[in-house]
C-alpha cells in the first residue's frame, strides 16, 4: 500500500489570481510590502469557507467601527486598541479585493461598497479620535478639529 503525497500549494498561481496587475510596483509601500502579502495568506484561509468579497468588506467596516468606538474612549488604551483594529481593517480591505478576483465576482456594486466603506472610515476615524480627545480634555476645539480633519480627508 502506497501513500500519495499531497501536491504542494502553488503560491505563484494563487497570487496571480488574487492580486491586481503589477502589484509589486503599484500602490503604497505598506500595500506592496505588508498589506497584500499578508492578505494573501488570510485570503487563502478564508476562501475555502465561502466568504464573499462583500462579506469581507462588511467585516472590514465593522472592524473600523470598533476602532472608532475605541478612539472615542479618549484614553491611551483606546488609542492603542483603535490603532490595532485599524491595522486589521487595512488587512481586510485587501482581502475583499483578493476574494473578488479569486472568485471571479468583481463588480461595480462591490467596488461601490468598498469605496463607501473607505469614505466612511476617512470621515469617522478622525472624528472619533478628536471626540476622544474632547472627552479626555473637555476642550471644545477638538470637536471642530475632528469635523475639519474628517471633512478634509473625505474631500481628498
Image (cartoon, rainbow, N blue to C red):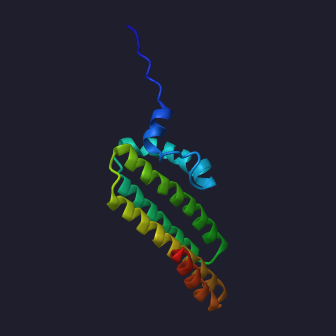
Residue 58: give x, y in percent of width and height.
39, 62
Instruction: Name the residue nearer the viewer: 74 or 107.
Output: 107
**Is residue 69 in sight in this rendering?**
no
Instruction: Name the residue nearer the viewer: 77 or 91.
Output: 91
Position of 135 relative to 85 (above/below): below
Total marks shown come to 0
The residue under the point 42% across, 40% down is 17
Q: Quadrant of the N terminus?
A: top left
**Is residue 143 in sight in this rendering?**
yes
Residue 55: give x, y in percent of width and height.
36, 57
The residue under the point 44% across, 48% down is 98
Q: Quadrant of the C terminus?
A: bottom right
The residue under the point 36% across, 57% down is 54
The residue under the point 43% across, 65% down is 115
Q: Examine the image and state in which quarter residue 56 appears.
A: bottom left
Residue 77: give x, y in percent of width and height.
64, 69
Residue 120: give x, y in percent of width and height.
46, 72
Position of 62 relative to 33 (above/below): below
Instruction: Name the residue nearer the viewer: 26 or 43.
Output: 26
Would you say 64 lies left or right of 75 here? Answer: left
Instruction: Name the residue nearer the viewer: 33 or 88.
Output: 33
* Residue lying farthest to the bottom in this orientation: 140
Q: Examine the image and state in which quarter residue 127 appears.
A: bottom right
Amino acid at each position: 500500500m502506497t501513500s500519495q503525497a499531497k501536491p504542494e500549494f502553488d503560491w505563484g498561481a494563487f497570487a496571480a489570481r488574487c492580486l491586481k496587475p503589477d502589484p509589486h510596483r503599484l500602490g503604497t509601500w505598506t500595500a506592496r510590502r505588508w498589506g497584500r502579502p499578508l492578505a494573501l495568506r488570510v485570503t487563502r484561509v478564508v476562501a475555502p469557507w465561502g466568504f464573499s468579497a462583500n462579506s469581507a468588506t462588511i467585516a472590514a467596516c465593522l472592524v473600523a467601527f470598533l476602532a472608532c468606538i475605541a478612539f472615542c474612549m479618549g484614553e491611551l488604551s483606546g488609542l492603542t486598541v483603535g490603532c490595532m483594529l485599524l491595522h486589521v481593517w487595512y488587512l481586510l480591505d485587501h482581502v475583499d479585493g483578493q476574494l473578488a478576483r479569486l472568485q471571479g465576482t468583481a463588480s461595480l456594486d462591490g467596488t461601490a461598497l468598498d469605496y463607501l466603506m473607505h469614505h466612511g472610515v476617512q470621515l469617522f476615524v478622525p472624528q472619533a479620535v478628536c471626540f476622544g480627545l474632547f472627552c479626555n480634555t473637555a476642550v471644545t476645539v477638538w470637536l471642530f478639529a475632528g469635523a475639519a480633519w474628517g471633512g478634509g480627508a473625505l474631500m481628498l
